[in-house]
Amino acid sequence: MHSASRSGIAIVLVSGIVLVSLGAASAAETPARKPIPKFVAHRVGTARYEPCGVGDFNKDGKLDIVSGPIIYFAPDWKAVKVRSVDGSVDDKGDGYYNDFMNAPLDVDGDGLLDIVSCDWFCMCIEWHRNNGGAAGEWQKFLVEKSGNHECGDLVDIDGDGKALEILVHVQPTVWWEVGKLPDGTRGLVKHVICQKLSEFGGGVGDVNGDGRPDVLRPTAWYEGPPDPRQAGVWKEHPFAIGHIEEGKADHTPQILVMDVNADGRNDIVTSSAHQWGIFWYEQLPGEGEPKWKQHVIDKSWTQAHALTLADLDGDGDLDLVTGKRFRAHNGGDPGESDPLIVCWYELERGPTPTWTRHDISNGEMIGAGLSIPVVDLDGDGDLDIVVSGKWGGPVWFENTSGAAPADWVDVMPPSDLKGWSRVPVPPGAPLGRQQWHLDESGKVLVCDGDGGHDMLLCDREFGDAVFHAEFRYTKVQGKSGYNSGVYVRNNKDGSLWHQAQIGDSSGGYLFGETPGADGQKKFFSTANIVKDGRVKPAGEWNTIEITARGKVLTLWVNGAVTCEIKDCGNPRGLVGVEGEGFRIEFRNLKVKELR
């Protein structure tokens, strides 16, 4: 992150995307608290590469994901191998690929994003030229072999508000930018800040409030000169950060700069990359050399090897997004076998700031690797999160609740059920008695469960959308095997249907009949792959959401994604609910159309 001044604009750098947020606003100026965002996981791939990046590689106006040698092109995430990467990772997550950075950057100036990569084992930085969709792999250009490269980030070192420079995490302190090489061609030009060896880790931000970006390492911060390209003028300010024991330096991931406590002085946020602890370092008041006080944000888990700042909840200040790296040292780190985590820490700025942890994924074999792009991936106006790692990715977490409440359309039926239609199951069968009605409050849709097997479908069609529903069964003593469902993209006659099965604990999966590539109807089911359907016992309220985007349907049940299918053949259809012999109540039926 680069903060242009102590009270000005903070520019957060995320995989080349610039997010702008207010700087040192007072606590009184903080906007009203907004709802906590909810995220739905979409598995884009299952490859075990640790870095990832986001950019529009084919200039179609949509953001794509790069991880290792593969670009996943939006909107359907078609995987295309564009280069070769040596190394291997086994099914346990042990081993490495020789690829530790995927930075989207137009190096040759042709208007197409290339990929800049670096590697620990090959001890090099290189870039790969975008061939514009032509056949064959992208051409590789070796930039330099100069020691172990832990990772690297796109940052703003020259203070122009654009993250077009690269800070690599090597032991000397150096940075790279696109420029003219001695032979007159465009390539990456190196700038040396200091040859002294440091622990790995680094970041960029305005530490001293002079309006110029400084460069931070775990053992020192380097004061940015008026001309950052002038060698030998970066003033070194020694300190020690990144270790659970205050006053000791340790290997960190990104080192981030922001005013945490709203006192007008920029502070530091980082973590131990392999050990315990996520920290913020308060810049204390006083003249002369800045002094620092360490505060622990969380020390309950290890290997927070990627950090990003972003305003996830839209309250005007920056929050911290991070995740647990998987098998970083093949079992050699503490907490190596603990559950994987992706989470964010909600910051409440003020004299005594608080960080509240919100888990996005916990114990679901999704973590983070070496980078976490946070960007509006789907163009719906809120910030999404992309992760990858040796656990098998990438995965993107769609922010489904950051948009304005008006984006949700209430589709609860009125008391006369106008705008909704009963459809028998199977199609053409006779309907039983009318078993659907609203309760006395008018806010709960009730199926008595004694009118046969039917669908109750909203007459309005939806395409790409999220269907939200809350439900509970009426508990019957000694009864089990409760059964019902929620639908998206159904035909009006029910001959094509896509159902979330919401029975008892064996529910929480998708099945149905959808058009195949040949136009013929085909059956699908994820019942055999769902291990934890997450449906609560009868008598308790449940919340589910089905996200339909393109050909992909994703089911979210009570706080976690349970499954998805990638070959839905109906681009549009009706949403609805099912009656099948059990009394069940539905409330808060609503739809958010996706743009």
Image (spheres, helix red, strand yellow):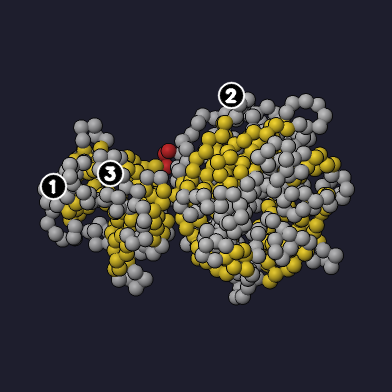
Observer able to see residue 120: yes
Q: Position of residue 135 (x, y in %)?
A: 60, 75
Crowd around label 3: few <14 · some 14–19 · many ≥20 (10 Å): some
Q: Nearer the viewer, residue 177 or 343?
A: 343
Dot 2 falls on a residue whose secondary structure is: helix
User: Where residue 340 is drawn, which disc sits there?
Assistant: none
Among numbered discs 1 and 3, the one appearing first in the sequence: 1
Q: Position of residue 149 (x, y in %)?
A: 72, 58
Amino acid beneath label 2: Ala
> In the figure, is residue 206 to the left or right of 34?
right
Dot 3 falls on a residue whose secondary structure is: loop
Observer able to see residue 384: no
Among numbered discs 3 and 2, the one appearing first in the sequence: 2
**Outermost residue to the bottom:** 135
Q: Position of residue 448 (x, y in %)?
A: 16, 43
> In the figure, is residue 107 to the left or right of 527?
right
What residue sits right under mark 1 in the picture? Answer: 450
Crowd around label 1: few <14 · some 14–19 · many ≥20 (10 Å): some
**Outermost residue to the right:** 232
What residue sits right under mark 3 in the picture? Answer: 537
Task: Mark 3 and mark 2 in contact? Answer it, CB < 8 Å.
Answer: no
Amino acid beneath label 1: Asp
What residue sits right under mark 2 in the picture? Answer: 28
Q: Position of residue 238 (x, y in %)?
A: 80, 40
